[in-house]
Amino acid sequence: MKELIFITPLILLILCGCSKKKSTDIIKYQSEIYLTDTYGNTVSLPTKATRVIALFDPCVDIMYMLGKEDLLVGVPSELYFDSEQYNYLSLIDARVRDKEIATPGSNELLNIESIIALKPDLVLTQNVPKSTLNILNNSGIAVYMATSESYDNVLRELSDIAILTGNEERGKELCDYARAKINEFNTRAGTDEPDSRKSVYFTWANGKIFSTTGHKSMMHNCLLMAGVENACPANIDRPNINPETLIKWNPDIIVMWNDSPELFYKKKELRKVKAINNRDIYNLMPMFFYNPHTLKSLCVAAAINDFAYGDKNSEEYDTKEEIKEIIKVLYGEDKGNKLLEYFNYEF
């Protein structure tokens, strides 16, 4: 068991001095790494992590984007039976293909004994009870909890994990690229003219056409990045609405996730909705390339920007090639090309 090190507030103040506080709240003290995760918990390591368990899907993606997948000794149990993840990650990691990486549970069902047996120095997860956090910390295992619920959190968590795994330069490179790409989207869409923005109604998968995205979700951030207006004004995560509300909102475009537009077209009461009447309904597929809780939110924004303004931008931008470029930047040329072998941009 590693010795726990306590730093008093006075010593911490002296260490921080008068320097400007970094976005990751990082403090280095005698070669140890300290930072605060997005839940406000302090995460400390004696040196960069060498054995990592990632039990939150976006964190698994971050490890591959950072080129640190070789550090993974544990992944979520659902990875091997979720075809969207397994089929693609198998292309870039033989250990995933052969199901050789251990699966000590998931966010909801951690197997503490299995985690400790794998001897990790870092566990990446979404949320764990305080009691579990204490057990792992007292066993010498650092725990970083991520949320990936906003654009700022996605960038911060990638930067934090880059620090914890000793690849700060790559983390900065990816964050700088993301910020530049978002500025490009906004310029392209002309978001300085709000009245010209198209409104988009987003609906989640599995037939839930009246379950949409409010202003407290990462998908809302993707809509903003795409330069469109979220048809839903609710300041919550995933509100459920009724047909009358959708008719009232009357969006220009509907974006679905892995469902058939026929779910809308067959509903006679919705025929006067602009997006349905004009058959402006689109799908984000394959889902692997459009995970909004990672930097692949850039692909989501690029696609939605194309749905909304493709006619205006078609001569200047090739969205399919743009998404390919994003994937190759995020995963690196080699892994990116392997993933893109099965990419198809058809709507």
Image: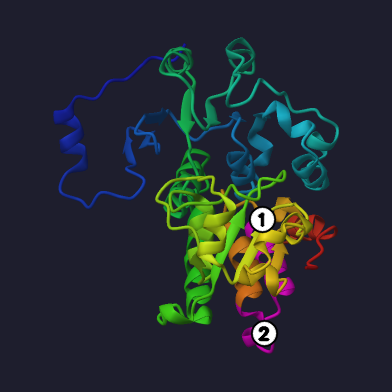
- Helix or strand or loop: what does disc 2 sit on? helix
State the predominant SS element of the stretch in magenta: helix
Give the distance between the C-alpha atoms of the residues marked 1 and 2, in whole angstroms. 22 Å
Q: Is residue 173 left or right of residue 16?
A: right
Q: Quadrant of residue 298?
A: bottom right
The x and y percentages for residue 164 are: 48, 38
Q: Which residues are magenta?
A: 309-332
Note whether 231 is above or below 203 in the view shown: below
Q: Tell me the kind of residue under disc 2.
A: Asp
Figure quadrant of the C terminus: bottom right
Q: Is residue 160 magenta?
A: no
Q: Which mark is residue 166?
A: none
Q: Tell me the kind of residue under disc 1.
A: Tyr
The x and y percentages for residue 156 are: 43, 49
Name the residue that disc number 1 marks: 290
The x and y percentages for residue 59 are: 58, 40
Note whether 30 is above or below 245 in the view shown: above
Q: Quadrant of residue 38?
A: top left
Q: Is residue 314 magenta?
A: yes
Q: Which mark is residue 311?
A: 2
Residue at 49 percent across and 28 percent down: it is 127
